[in-house]
Image (tube, rainbow, N blue to C red):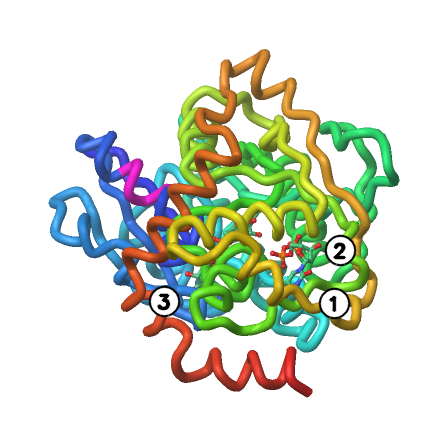
Amino acid sequence: MKVRVLITGGAGFIGSHVVRLFVKKYPNYKIFNLDALTYAGNLSNLKDIEEEANYTFIKGDINDEAFISEIFQTHRFEGVIHLAAESHVDRSIKDPLAFVKTNIIGTLNLLNAFKDLWKDNFEGKRFYHISTDEVYGTLGETGLFTESTSYDPNSPYSASKASSDHFVRAYSETYGLPYVITNCSNNYGENQFPEKLIPLFINNIIHNKPLPVYGDGNYTRDWLYVKDHAIAIDLVYHKGLNEETYNIGGFNEWKNIDLVKLLCEQMDSKLGRKKGTSEKLITYVKDRPGHDLRYAIDASKIKNELGWQPSVTFEQGLEKTIEWYLNNKEWLDDVTSGEYQSYYENHYNK
Ligand code: NAD
Ligand code: TYD
């Protein structure tokens, strides 16, 4: 009998890298990718593996309780790796309820279906919730988030992720559901939807459009290459301990403005433009409300206990990322047509 693993949100950015890794690495697993294909989900992210014998795509919404219950009863997933979410802070500021629905209620539907299926014997089963460092709120100029940092979310997005983390833990305490949670820092890399900082700015540089830096640009994030996150997820899924949380980060803090300048420099070089050309596109714009000053992860637990660490430097990862976007302009044009245009106009040009 094959091990049946459900990966939710597998058509999205991080999920597609996790699905690919699992499908290729574990031919003895049956990998089910459940995704609603929202604006952020794109099956072309998985074209290269869609015909594999151990891969099945299920289109569906985690908010649909009856449907979720039915697919758990039909396929009897022994493991769940839950990534499906509304994931963009700016959108959460405009429409918090969508985040409550998918990130909290959707997660509860999965927890309930998993519990109902295995409650008589949770042995060998695992519910893995993929979360974010944003649940910890903001840091000042110093310090790092550890696994014991108190939750203090500031955006509707991070509040919804914090809530779902709490529910996962509550289901363990109350019903004995075996779980593991990871809280990861900002990811970047191939297939990221161009609403997030790095792909948005790559796309704008390609089209000579302004680069909208929020506030003074002195906000700090800890950046991790997405394929290194996928490797960490594989490791935690297989070797992490039940009822444990692991922080995942890049040991790689950048102030936004410094990151944008590095990106401009690399883009000029790749596009054969004169040094300094792209930097001229930098435009300081109105700040994001409730903007967290700094995120930085202490990833020593996963490093010491599971032997994980990032495999590429930021410069290497960024170069691979830029090359991918330049070689996949069709992908970029496709995802920036339609809904994206009205999102962009509404958010940046109002
Ligand atoms: P994404 O927005 O690129 O992808 C989300 C995927 O979930 C999409 O394919 C979308 O179609 C799907 N989805 C959304 N709502 C759904 C629903 N109701 N039912 C079924 N599918 C639905 O997100 P991402 O950046 O890949 O993030 C994946 C997970 O990782 C999220 O849980 C996010 O909170 C977490 N995370 C992201 C980052 C980051 O930097 N991107 C960092 C840490 C943690
Ligand atoms: P983002 O990629 O949205 O990730 P998160 O908010 O989850 O950290 O933003 C990363 C940083 O870049 C954050 O400090 C906000 C900033 N930012 C801009 O300055 N301009 C933009 O247009 C965007 C999307 C983000």
- The C terminus, quarter of image: bottom right
Q: Earlier in the sequence, mark 2 or mark 3?
A: 2
Q: Position of residue 227 (x, y in %)?
A: 41, 37
Residue hosting label 3: 332
Q: Earlier in the sequence, mark 1 or mark 2?
A: 2
Q: Is residue 100 magenta?
A: no
- The N terminus, quarter of image: top left
* Between 349 and 280, the one nearer to me in the picture: 280
Q: Are marks 3 and 1 in contact (CB under 8 Å)?
A: no
Q: Which type of secondary structure does the marked residue at label 1 adopt?
A: strand
Name the front one of labels 3 and 1: 1
Density class for disc 2 (Cα within 10 Å; few <14, some 14-19, many ≥20) is: some
Question: Residue at point 41% right, 75% down?
Answer: 336
* Between 18 and 53, the one nearer to me in the picture: 18
Question: Residue at point 43% right, 54% down?
Answer: 13
Q: Which type of secondary structure does the marked residue at label 2 adopt?
A: loop
Q: Which residues are magenta?
A: 18-22
Q: Position of residue 165 (x, y in %)?
A: 66, 45
Q: Amino acid at mark 1?
A: Tyr
Residue hosting label 2: 217
Disc 1 to disc 2, C-alpha distance: 8 Å
Q: Are marks 1 and 2 in contact (CB under 8 Å)?
A: yes
Density class for disc 1 (Cα within 10 Å; few <14, some 14-19, many ≥20) is: some
Q: Which type of secondary structure does the marked residue at label 3 adopt?
A: helix
Q: Earlier in the sequence, mark 3 or mark 1?
A: 1
Magenta stretch: helix, strand or loop mostly:
helix
For disc 2, does the CB lie below 8 Å from ligand 2? Answer: yes
Residue hosting label 1: 284
Question: Residue at point 60% right, 45% down?
Answer: 186
Q: Amino acid at mark 2?
A: Gly
